[in-house]
Amino acid sequence: MSSSNSVEGSYSKRCAACKHLRRRCAEDCVLAPYFPATHPERFECIHKIFGAGNVARMLKAIPVQERAQATDSLSAEAYWRVQDPVYGSTGIVIQTNQEISVTQCELAKIRAQISMYEAHKATEQQPLPPPRLPQQGSLGSQENMPMFEPNDPFNFLN
């Protein structure tokens, strides 16, 4: 009976990686701190894309203080690669860049409309200059005579 208790104890302490691979989880399992049994889907994505052996080798090759960040990065990349096998996380970056570009164009148009509105408001608020009165003595001169022929079709003054 004591052997069954120890077996049950080892099963409950297995990490998600060891559970997925159906093996015993060693005390020095490099994957255990980063793949708890409560989140098996995280390891499943990583295993599907990178493979358990490759991930274990990568984690052993980097310093312990950087392993959590590396695991998070691998997990995110694997998740997006499973969601979009062609583009992976690059597809998300491309889509986000397109949305940023569209939003920047929209913002530029709105700013142009605002500046046009402000310019229109400024001209409406300025008083009109006084009309120019002709100088004395120049009323009958040819300089002030219209340059239109009387039967000209473009003469709108008739």
Image (cartoon, rainbow, N blue to C red):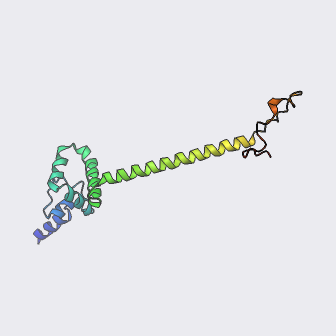
- For the point 14% across and 65% down, the residue is 22
Residue 6 lies left or right of residue 46; in this view the side is: left
Q: Residue at x 49, y 47 (%)?
A: 105
Can you give x and y, in whole percent of width and height, for residue 93 in the image? 35, 50
Q: Is residue 30 above or below residue 124?
A: below
Q: How many marks?
A: 0
**Is residue 108 depicted above or below 1 in this figure?**
above
| Residue 35, horizontal then vertical, whole percent | 24, 57
Q: Nearer the viewer, residue 125 or 148?
A: 148
Quadrant of the image occupied by residue 14:
bottom left
Residue at the extreme front of the image, as rendered: 151
Image: 136 above or below 70: above
Q: Residue at x 20, y 65 (%)?
A: 12
Regarding residue 145, the answer to whether it shows in the image is: yes
Q: Position of residue 23 (x, y in %)?
A: 13, 62
Foreground of the two, 126 or 48: 126
Work out which residue is located at the far top of the displayed protein and give it: 137
The residue closer to the viewer here, 40 or 65, is: 40
Q: Is residue 156 left or right of residue 101?
A: right
- Residue at x 13% of width, y 61% of height: 24
Residue 15 visible in the snapshot = no
Which quadrant: the N terminus?
bottom left
